[in-house]
Amino acid sequence: MLKASNLRADIFRLLDKVIETGHPLEIERKGQILQIIPKESASKLSKLAKHDCILCNPEELIHMDWEKEWKHDIP
C-alpha cells in the first residue's frame, strides 16, 4: 500500500506493474483504501518464460542416436 503522493510521483511505472502482474495496487487517501485493478486479469500462461523446445515427431526422439549427446566423463 502506498500514499497518494507516492502514486503521483511514479504513476506510469506503477500502472504498468498492475498490468504486468494482474495484482491490484492499493492506495491510501484521506484514511480510505483505494484499489487500481486490471479489468481483465493477466493470463497465467502469458507470464511463462519462453524455453527452447524440440519440434519433431516423438518417435524420432525414441529412435535417435544420443551417443554424441552423452557425457562420457563418468568413472
Image (cartoon, rainbow, N blue to C red):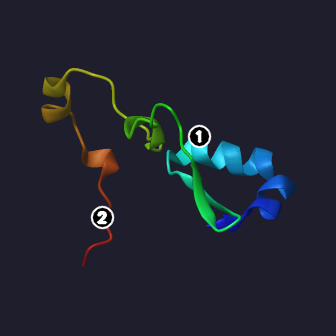
Q: Amino acid at mark 1?
A: Ile
Numbered badge on residue 1:
none
Spot occupied by residue 49 in the image (x, y as percentages of width and height): 47, 44
What residue lies at 53% left-to-right and 37% top-to-bottom? 38
Q: Is residue 16 left or right of residue 5?
A: left
Crowding near pointer 2: few (<14 within 10 Å), some, many (20+)?
Answer: few
* Residue marked by disc 2: 72
**Residue reaching furthest bottom?**
75
The image quadrant where one finds the C terminus is bottom left
Q: Amino acid at mark 2?
A: His
Is there a contact, CB below 8 Å, between mark 1 and mark 2?
no
Crowding near pointer 1: few (<14 within 10 Å), some, many (20+)?
Answer: some
Q: Is residue 66 left or right of residue 33?
A: left
Task: Tell me if I can see residue 50 in this picture.
Answer: no
31 vs 56, nearest the viewer: 31
Quarter location, residue 45: top left
3 vs 15, nearest the viewer: 3
* Residue marked by disc 1: 19
The local secondary structure at tag 2 comes to loop
Q: Earlier in the sequence, mark 1 or mark 2?
A: 1
Quarter location, residue 19: top right
Total numbered circles:
2
1 vs 18, nearest the viewer: 1
66 vs 5, nearest the viewer: 5
What residue lies at 20% left-to-right and 32% top-to-bottom? 61
Task: Tell me if I can see residue 70 in this picture.
Answer: yes
